[in-house]
Amino acid sequence: MIMNIFFTCLLIGISLSMDAFSLALIYGTYGLTKKQKITLSIIVGTFHFIMPLIGLSFGNMIYQYFILNINLLVGIIFAIIGINLIISSKKEEEVKILVSFLGFLLFGLSVSIDSLTTGIGLSAISNNYFAVASMFMIISASFTYLGLHLGNKLSDKFGTYATISGGIMMIILALYYILKP
């Protein structure tokens, strides 16, 4: 029974981290420093720890009192990141929002929104909420760092084309989220 819960939570943690990994691949093409990669990974992990607990705590109350289209919010954030990536590939100077703390917070928030909704049903899976949230945190931080590192390698190999491709992919993802029913 305990092993079933562990593997269930592990698979959920991996699936929640795939957004972070795939977007970190794109974000990594920007050429972040090691310190920035670690900072962003910690932020993503922290969001993946906090969001399920918030979802668990507030659950349906959020949907009853606030009319908020999460897909639209995530789409707008992805579009901003994508546009900034494309603009940064054309300029010699950095676009500050991408590598600022605010940019990292927006990235962390956007890839952890699904953890919020997962938290709503967390009580059906396990009653050890902090252990599960910790597992989500470790997995997502690891996947984010790996994605950033691999994205950086792609950038080294393909340069500006990787950054532009990353920006285009972010805009496509933004449209997907905005148009998602």
Image (tube, helix red, strand yellow):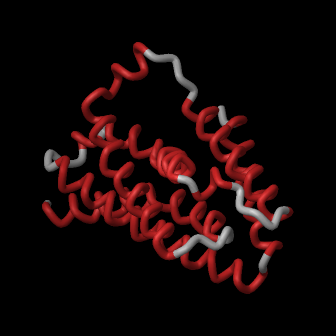
Residue occupying the far right of the picture: 90
Q: Residue furthest front?
A: 93
Find residue 105 and report its horizontal and vertical position in percent: 49, 48
Placement of the N terminus among the 4 image quadrants: bottom left
Q: Residue at x 72, y 35 (%)?
A: 179
The residue positioned farthest toward the top in the image shown: 65
- Which residue is at the front of the view, 115 or 155? 155
> Image quarter for residue 159?
bottom right
Image quarter for residue 91?
A: bottom right
Counting labels gives: 0
The spot of residue 95 in percent (x, y) is 71, 56
Quadrant in which the C terminus is drawn: top right
Residue 58 occupies quadrant: top left
Left or right of 7 in this view: 176? right
Residue displayed at 47% across by 42% down: 113
Give coordinates of residue 83: x percent, y percent: 77, 50
Residue at x 47% of width, y 61% of height: 40
- Residue 118 vertical position relative to residue 57 in the rendered view, above or below: below
Q: Residue at x 32, y 40 (%)?
A: 119
Relative vertical location of residue 92 with respect to residue 125 in this rendering, above or below: below
Closer to the camera in the image, 2 or 19: 19
Give the side of residue 128 with respect to residue 136, left or right: left
Q: Position of residue 145 (x, y in %)?
A: 47, 71
